[in-house]
Amino acid sequence: MTVNGTRLELGVNAGIEHCRTMLEECRDHAGTGADVEINAADVARADTATLQMLIALRRDLRTNGGTLKWLAVSCEMHDVAERMGLIEALGMPAVATPAVTNSPAEN
Protein backbone atom coordinates (compact mmCIF):
# COMPACT_ATOMS: atom_id res chain seq x y z
CA MET A 1 0.00 0.00 0.00
CA THR A 2 1.35 3.39 -0.95
CA VAL A 3 -0.08 6.87 -0.99
CA ASN A 4 1.16 9.20 -3.70
CA GLY A 5 -0.46 12.59 -3.32
CA THR A 6 -4.16 11.83 -3.56
CA ARG A 7 -3.71 8.42 -5.20
CA LEU A 8 -3.92 5.31 -3.03
CA GLU A 9 -2.24 2.21 -4.48
CA LEU A 10 -3.61 -0.76 -2.56
CA GLY A 11 -1.11 -3.34 -3.81
CA VAL A 12 -1.52 -7.10 -3.55
CA ASN A 13 -2.43 -7.28 0.14
CA ALA A 14 -5.23 -4.95 1.23
CA GLY A 15 -5.50 -6.46 4.69
CA ILE A 16 -6.14 -5.10 8.16
CA GLU A 17 -2.44 -4.64 8.83
CA HIS A 18 -2.43 -1.69 6.40
CA CYS A 19 -5.67 0.00 7.49
CA ARG A 20 -4.28 2.39 10.07
CA THR A 21 -1.65 3.73 7.68
CA MET A 22 -4.17 4.06 4.85
CA LEU A 23 -6.67 5.87 7.02
CA GLU A 24 -4.11 8.29 8.49
CA GLU A 25 -2.64 9.10 5.08
CA CYS A 26 -5.99 9.54 3.36
CA ARG A 27 -7.76 11.43 6.12
CA ASP A 28 -5.23 14.22 5.66
CA HIS A 29 -6.83 14.76 2.24
CA ALA A 30 -10.42 14.14 3.35
CA GLY A 31 -10.66 17.44 5.21
CA THR A 32 -9.47 19.48 2.23
CA GLY A 33 -12.29 18.60 -0.15
CA ALA A 34 -9.78 16.88 -2.44
CA ASP A 35 -10.65 13.76 -4.38
CA VAL A 36 -8.82 10.53 -3.58
CA GLU A 37 -8.15 8.04 -6.37
CA ILE A 38 -7.81 4.35 -5.61
CA ASN A 39 -5.95 1.81 -7.66
CA ALA A 40 -7.02 -1.64 -6.50
CA ALA A 41 -5.95 -3.43 -9.70
CA ASP A 42 -3.41 -5.67 -7.98
CA VAL A 43 -5.42 -6.63 -4.89
CA ALA A 44 -5.35 -10.39 -4.35
CA ARG A 45 -6.44 -10.23 -0.70
CA ALA A 46 -8.90 -7.81 0.89
CA ASP A 47 -10.70 -8.07 4.19
CA THR A 48 -13.64 -6.45 5.93
CA ALA A 49 -11.47 -3.99 7.87
CA THR A 50 -10.13 -2.53 4.63
CA LEU A 51 -13.62 -2.20 3.17
CA GLN A 52 -14.89 -0.55 6.35
CA MET A 53 -11.98 1.89 6.27
CA LEU A 54 -12.71 2.76 2.64
CA ILE A 55 -16.39 3.35 3.44
CA ALA A 56 -15.39 5.68 6.30
CA LEU A 57 -12.96 7.49 4.01
CA ARG A 58 -15.63 7.90 1.33
CA ARG A 59 -18.04 9.30 3.91
CA ASP A 60 -15.43 11.77 5.19
CA LEU A 61 -14.54 12.86 1.67
CA ARG A 62 -18.17 13.41 0.72
CA THR A 63 -18.79 15.42 3.91
CA ASN A 64 -16.03 17.82 2.85
CA GLY A 65 -16.89 18.03 -0.85
CA GLY A 66 -14.43 15.40 -2.14
CA THR A 67 -14.99 12.05 -3.77
CA LEU A 68 -13.47 8.59 -3.76
CA LYS A 69 -12.66 7.59 -7.34
CA TRP A 70 -11.87 4.02 -8.35
CA LEU A 71 -9.21 3.86 -11.07
CA ALA A 72 -9.16 0.06 -11.12
CA VAL A 73 -10.66 -2.79 -9.09
CA SER A 74 -9.34 -6.36 -9.16
CA CYS A 75 -11.78 -9.24 -9.49
CA GLU A 76 -10.88 -10.36 -5.95
CA MET A 77 -11.53 -6.95 -4.39
CA HIS A 78 -14.79 -6.60 -6.31
CA ASP A 79 -15.93 -10.11 -5.32
CA VAL A 80 -15.34 -9.45 -1.62
CA ALA A 81 -17.24 -6.15 -1.77
CA GLU A 82 -20.07 -7.76 -3.73
CA ARG A 83 -20.41 -10.73 -1.34
CA MET A 84 -20.72 -8.25 1.53
CA GLY A 85 -23.24 -6.07 -0.31
CA LEU A 86 -20.91 -3.05 -0.22
CA ILE A 87 -20.55 -2.11 -3.89
CA GLU A 88 -22.86 0.89 -3.58
CA ALA A 89 -21.54 2.00 -0.16
CA LEU A 90 -18.02 2.01 -1.60
CA GLY A 91 -19.05 3.77 -4.81
CA MET A 92 -17.31 0.92 -6.61
CA PRO A 93 -17.97 0.20 -10.31
CA ALA A 94 -20.67 -2.41 -10.92
CA VAL A 95 -18.10 -4.74 -12.49
CA ALA A 96 -14.40 -5.33 -11.82
CA THR A 97 -12.10 -3.01 -13.77
CA PRO A 98 -8.67 -4.61 -13.38
CA ALA A 99 -6.84 -2.14 -15.66
CA VAL A 100 -6.04 1.35 -14.41
CA THR A 101 -7.94 4.09 -16.19
CA ASN A 102 -6.55 7.57 -16.54
CA SER A 103 -7.83 10.18 -14.19
CA PRO A 104 -9.27 13.31 -15.85
CA ALA A 105 -6.05 15.22 -15.06
CA GLU A 106 -4.02 12.67 -17.02
CA ASN A 107 -6.09 12.91 -20.22
Image: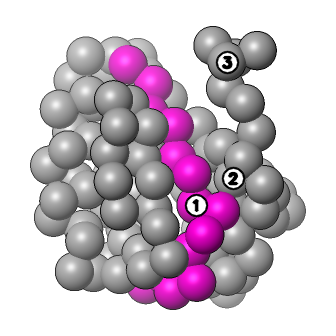
Q: Secondary structure at mark 2?
A: strand
**Against 59, is 99 above or below?**
below
Q: Position of residue 34 (x, y in %)?
A: 38, 19
Using the image as rendered, state which of residue 91 and residue 103 is in the foreground: 103
Q: Which residue is mark 3?
A: 106
Which residue is rendered at x = 50% and y = 29% of the image? 67
- Under mark 3, the amino acid is Glu
Which residue is rendered at x = 35% and y = 37% of the image? 4
Which residue is rendered at x = 67% and y = 26% of the image? 103
Q: Position of residue 50 (x, y in %)?
A: 37, 71
Q: CA distance from mark 3 to mark 1?
A: 18 Å
User: Is residue 80 shown left or right of residue 55?
Assistant: right
What numbered label is drawn on residue 40?
1
- Specify few, some or many for label 3: CA neighbours under 10 Å numbering under 14, 14-19, or 20 or more: few
Which residue is rendered at x = 21% and y = 23% of the image? 31
Q: Which residue is mark 2?
A: 72
Part of the protein shown in magenta: 34-47
